[in-house]
Amino acid sequence: DHVLVLWLPKYSPQLNAIEGLWGYLKRSALNNYFFGDVPSLQAAMVGAFNVLNQNPKTTLSLAYRTSQNLGKIA
């Protein structure tokens, strides 16, 4: 009586917070660039995370979009 089962589609990236983060990383740091080695890729990702840490509004907007999508299906 106290549990609401909500069936989600098998693939729903708009409901998964990490997908928003991956999308941001692809657009901001990883798009159209070939990284010749893992340390270069890691450095680009660390740089993108540092930018996110300095801009909390961007980080919050990624989380807000996910919560909006969750609210639409609830």
Image (cartoon, rainbow, N blue to C red):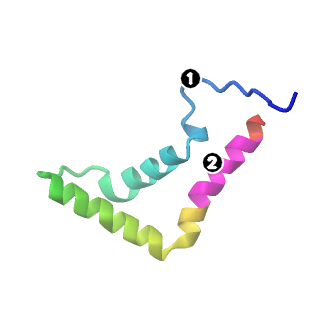
Please report the bounds of the magenta region as a residue range: 61-71
Residue at x 57%, y 32% (from the top left corner): 12
Residue 23, percent from left and from top: 45, 48
Q: Where is mark 1, residue-wise?
A: 10
Place residue 2 in its image quadrant. Answer: top right
Residue at x 39%, y 54% (from the top left corner): 25
Residue 16, percent from left and from top: 56, 41
Place residue 52 in its image quadrant. Answer: bottom left
Q: In this picture, is 55 found above or below 27?
A: below
Work out whether residue 58 or residue 18 is closer to the camera in this orientation and state it: 18
Q: Left of 30 or right of it: where is 56?
A: right
Q: Left of 52 or right of it: where is 57?
A: right
Q: How many marks?
A: 2
- Mark 2 is surrounded, within 10 Å at the Cα level, by few (under 14), some (14 to 19) or many (20 or more) other residues, namely some
Q: Secondary structure at mark 1?
A: loop
Residue 50, percent from left and from top: 38, 71
Residue 59, percent from left and from top: 54, 63
**Residue type of the residue flagged with mark 2:** Thr
Taking the magenta stretch, the answer to whether it contains residue 41 is: no
- Mark 1 is surrounded, within 10 Å at the Cα level, by few (under 14), some (14 to 19) or many (20 or more) other residues, namely few
**Residue type of the residue flagged with mark 1:** Lys
Q: Residue farthest to the right?
A: 1
Place residue 11 in its image quadrant. Answer: top right
Which quadrant, please, contains the C terminus?
top right
Taking the magenta stretch, the answer to whether it contains residue 67 is: yes
